[in-house]
Amino acid sequence: MKLIVGLGNPGNEYNFTRHNFGFLALDFYFKVNKLEWEKNPKFGAVWARQGDTFFLKPQDYYNDSGKAVKSFVNFYKIPLENILIICDNFDLAFGKMRHHKTGSAGGNNGLKSVTKELGTDEYPRLRLGTGNAELRQKLGDVNFVLSKFTPEEKEKLPEILTATSKIIDLAKD
């Protein structure tokens, strides 16, 4: 079994915000591949299954994302190396990606929650860069991660999300 998790916040007011890059990546993947989310949440998450792969959008807020991840991992006995957590990273330039098999949370509260709930940081993660130093300095960190993408950034999203979809396909294999 495999588990691919997009981190974000539930609610339409968070659509197209930087903190919802993980949700956006999975929604894009689902649209391109004509997949559908299950109608009923499970373990506090919107979810779907394709073959031996589960997809997950935790519905606890970003900073508590680990609860749903832990429930799926424990119930389905998913090995840590078969997990991929997709999250935003404001320290990484917009459009850049970092894919690591293990590592620290690096200040990302969603990853901190996953690490706390799983009791380890030995799981793969894909960080999607949202960095915009000028806007971040102007808004402050909290307002920055909850801000919408700029028009210029929105133009680049299809290219970034297509590249992310390729990484999701590799994680499924």
Image (cartoon, grey):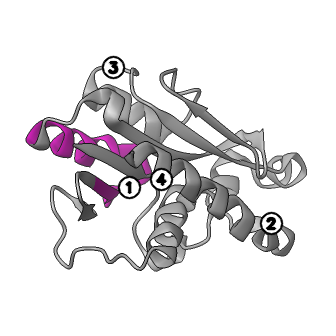
Q: Is residue 62 left or right of residue 80?
A: right
Sequence order check, earlier mark of 2 and 1: 1
Is residue 8 visible to the viewer in this orientation of the structure?
A: yes
Q: Nearer the viewer, mark 4 or mark 2?
A: 4
Residue segment shown in magenta:
54-75
**Amino acid type of the residue tagged 2 in the rendering:** Glu
In which quadrant of the rendered view does residue 67 lie? top left
In front of the other: label 3 or label 4?
Answer: 4
Give the CA separation, mark 1 to mark 3. 20 Å
- Under tag 2, what secondary structure? helix
Q: Residues within 10 Å of mark 4 (few under 14, many from 20)?
A: few
The residue that disc 2 covers is 153
Which residue of the protein is positioned furthest toward the left in this rendering?
Answer: 75
How far apart in space, not on screen, are marks 3 and 4 (Cα)?
25 Å
Mark 3 lies on a secondary structure that is loop
Image quadrant assignment for residue 126? top right
x then y, percent, for residue 34: 41, 80
| Position of 29 relative to 54 (above/below) | below
N-terminal of the pair, mark 4 or mark 2, is: 2
Q: What's under tag 3, amino acid-wise?
A: Thr
Q: Nearer the viewer, mark 1 or mark 4?
A: 4
Q: Disc 2 or disc 1, which is closer to the eye?
A: 2
State the mark number for residue 169. Answer: 4
Tell me the residue that label 3 is attached to. 120
Is 19 rendered above or below residue 159? above
* Label ID, residue 61: 1
The amino acid type, in three-letter code, at marker 4 is Asp
Mark-to-mark CA distance, 4 and 2:
24 Å
